[in-house]
């Protein structure tokens, strides 16, 4: 069984290797993040701390934020297949009917959770409770998520049963893997509020778009690591009895 540190290094290295192999796919989160920054600049979000607070719940920003969440997940179809095949780009980019349909099911679940977090349970006890629920639930159903682009259906219940003994690793590893880039991401976003020059703001937000794209890939790679930790996932139907 690989160590925590080995896997930590691997997800960052593999995410960069995937970006080099399939740059157009890897650019989807970058473009989505930059478009949201364009919207945020237009509504004056980075003008001052008060403006940032006043526009945090701006409807246009939230709508683009919702679209961005979906965009951040789109490379997963290709990245999971790329990881599963040992870096075969032809397999990664092949759109297969069953795999695409199952992946659409996964995207629908992720879209529902994003919609609830952005527009329904946004604050207070329900907001906190829903955040904690997502923090625990998604790592437990990760085999369902990762198997889908391989054309394999593993039900959420089957995934939870397999992942339960590995729950602590499944929850903590993605957080640890993303933390360094998350710090940079928030530092750039908050820093852009306090600099005076618009040119510098754009430079920081442009850099943040690259950081966010890398962060999205690291998140996907971390999902693959935790999903395959209990047992491999075959690209065919499986009872997932591991």
Image (cartoon, rainbow, N blue to C red):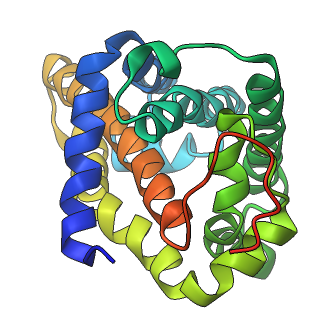
Residue 141 at x, y percent in the picture: 71, 64
- Label total for image: 0
Residue in the picture at 25% in, 64% down = 8
Residue 188 in view: no
Instruction: Give the quadrant of the C terminus.
Output: bottom right
| Residue 200 appears in the figure | yes
Is 15 situated left or right of 83 in this image? left
Image height check: is 66 above or below 165?
above
Q: Residue 221 placed where, x, y %?
A: 41, 48
Q: Is residue 28 left or right of residue 117?
A: left
Closest to the observer, 46 or 188 = 188
- In front here: 42 or 212? 212
Q: Quadrant of the N terminus?
A: bottom left
Of 50 and 144, the residue lying toward us: 144
Instruction: Residue 106: give x, y in percent of width and height.
Output: 76, 42
Residue, x 43% and y 60% (percent of image)? 225
Q: Give residue 189's position: percent from left, percent from top.
A: 31, 43
Above or below: residue 214 compared with residue 198: below
Q: For the point 64% across and 77% down, which residue is it?
A: 163
Q: Residue at x 43, y 50 (%)?
A: 219
């Amino acid at each position: 069984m690989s160590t925590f540190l080995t896997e930590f290094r691997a997800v960052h290295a593999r995410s960069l290797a995937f970006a080099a192999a399939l740059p157009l796919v890897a650019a989807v989160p970058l473009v989505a993040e930059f478009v949201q920054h364009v919207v945020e600049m237009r509504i004056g979000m980075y003008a001052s701390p008060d403006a940032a607070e006043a526009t945090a719940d701006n409807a246009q920003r939230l709508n683009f934020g919702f679209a961005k969440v979906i965009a951040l997940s789109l490379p997963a179809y290709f990245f999971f297949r790329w990881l599963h095949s040992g870096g075969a780009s032809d397999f990664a980019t092949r759109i297969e009917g069953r795999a695409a349909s199952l992946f659409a099911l996964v995207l629908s679940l992720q879209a529902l959770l994003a919609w609830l977090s952005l527009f329904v349970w946004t604050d207070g006890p329900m907001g906190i409770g829903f955040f904690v629920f997502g923090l625990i639930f998604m790592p437990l159903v990760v085999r369902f998520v990762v198997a889908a682009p391989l054309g394999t259906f593993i039900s959420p219940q089957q995934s939870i049963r397999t992942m339960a003994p590995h729950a602590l690793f499944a929850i903590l590893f993605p957080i640890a893997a993303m933390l360094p880039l998350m710090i940079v991401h928030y530092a750039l976003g908050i820093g852009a509020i306090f600099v005076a020059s618009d040119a510098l703001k754009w430079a920081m937000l442009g850099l943040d778009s690259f950081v966010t794209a890398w962060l999205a890939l690291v998140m996907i790679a971390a999902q693959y690591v935790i999903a395959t930790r209990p047992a491999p996932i075959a690209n065919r139907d499986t009872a997932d009895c591991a």
